[in-house]
């Protein structure tokens, strides 16, 4: 997998993470939503190499910003 594919995958995973995060925060007692959110956190952590969901999201956002900057 080349760097652009990795960046795209991290972007998709970050989008899913944010989507499930909103649903989890809206319904924290829903076991299905919680389980799905936790699986998404695991995927984002694996994609970024971080151990914490918040850190993984921060790392993913930083990578996305860096990838979006034009090179000279």
Image: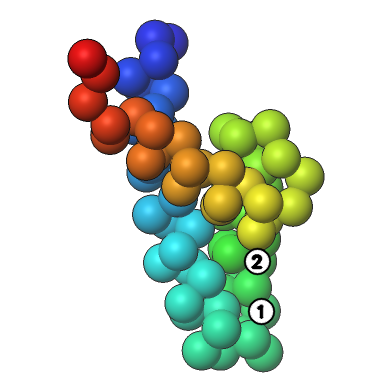
Q: Is residue 12 above or below residue 35?
A: above
Q: Quadrant of residue 43?
A: top right
Q: Residues within 10 Å of mark 2 (few under 14, many from 20)?
A: few
Q: Which residue is depicted at the point 52% across and 71% down?
A: 21
Side of 8 relative to 39 (left or right): left
- For residue 57, side relative to residue 31 (left or right): left
User: Tag 1's secondary structure?
Assistant: helix
* Local crowd size for mark 1, using a 10 Å CA cut-off: few (<14), some (14–19), many (≥20): few
* Between 52 and 65, the one nearer to me in the picture: 65
Q: Is residue 70 left or right of residue 32?
A: left
**Residue that mark 2 sits on:** 35
Residue 39 seen = no
Q: Residue at x 46, y 47 (%)?
A: 61
Q: Residue at x 37, y 41 (%)?
A: 65
Secondary structure category for the residue under label 2: helix
> Residue 64 is drawn in which quadrant?
top left
């Amino acid at each position: 997998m080349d760097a652009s594919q990795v960046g795209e995958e991290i972007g998709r995973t970050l989008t899913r993470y944010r989507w499930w995060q909103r649903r989890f925060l809206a319904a924290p007692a829903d076991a299905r939503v919680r389980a799905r959110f936790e699986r998404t956190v695991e995927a984002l952590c694996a994609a970024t190499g971080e151990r914490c969901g918040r850190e993984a999201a921060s790392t993913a956002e930083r990578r996305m910003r860096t990838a979006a900057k034009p090179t000279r």
